[in-house]
Image: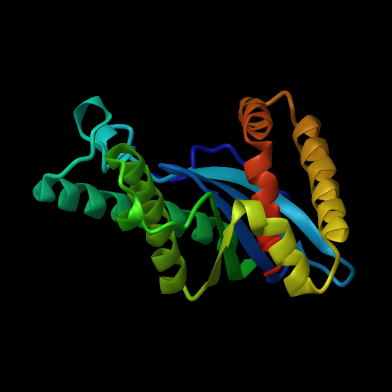
Amino acid sequence: MASDGSSHLQNAVTKTQTAALGFRVKSAWAAVVLLTHTAHSPQLSDVSRIELCDPRLPETRQPYHAAMGKLETNSTKLDQRERAVRSISQQALTILLKRYQQKGFWIRRAALVVGSQIDPAKIANPHIRAHALEGQLFRSAMEQTLQDHNVRTDVLLERDAYSTVAARLRQSSHDVERAIQDFGRSRRRNVDHGAQSKSSRCLLRYLRSDSRGIMAAEAGALQC
């Protein structure tokens, strides 16, 4: 499905502006940040989330889970669920990219921040393997769609995000952390400015509930 509307996009730019996206990929949804590049420094232009499942199809939230939390082994069900997740993810990302394009942003790169990249086949516990397979599916579905839209994409581990970005930018981890803190202040100002609206209140709750994931996504976008 498309974004749930939890977004605080700044005013439309008057001409095309280069931008980068950072995603913290979760199971069935993803946090999204949009960074624009100015002559002086990157600016946080939007924070939102997109849904990668269909609430009308509960099985798309945890496609590799069977009843009682067991690993689903029915190949027919798995094939249907995988195709549904990829279709939903493609739709959500396409809508997101089109919205940014209409606002005048040219998205050239993106970073997908994930919690793990372990090979699910190496996990003995079926329940844990189901979660790993789901993480792999949602990530790969997003990565494929971004590539289809000619958006160069990198995948980062959340625990290594700051150090990886610092190395790529040839800066210290402290510099990266300070930039993320600046983004955090910008987030709070933007949301507080429109706190009376329903969408802003929803976004504020979301920012508070997943600040770590959003910060990781910001770090990922920073190195794009």
Tell me the residue at 21%/34% (across/down). 66
Q: Say how many tags the image has.
A: 0
Q: Is residue 104 visible?
A: no
Q: Is residue 179 visible?
A: yes
| 160 or 207, nearer to the observer | 160
Taking the image as shown, residue 187 lies to the left or right of residue 77, namely: right
Taking the image as shown, residue 32 lies to the left or right of residue 187, namely: left
Tell me the residue at 65%/65% (across/down). 20
| Vertical comparison of 102 with 199: above or below | below
Residue 73: percent from left, percent from top? 15, 44
Q: Quadrant of the C terminus?
A: bottom right
| Vertical comparison of 150 with 60: above or below | below
Residue 104: percent from left, percent from top? 65, 65
Residue 199: percent from left, percent from top? 61, 31
Would you identify the image quadrant in which residue 40 lies? bottom right
Furthest-front residue in view?
124
Residue 172: percent from left, percent from top? 86, 64
Taking the image as shown, residue 79 lies to the left or right of residue 209, namely: left
Q: Quadrant of the N terminus?
A: top left
Q: How is the image coloured?
A: rainbow
Tell me the residue at 78%/72% (across/down). 169
Would you identify the image quadrant in which residue 140 lies? bottom left
Tell me the residue at 30%/47% (across/down). 124
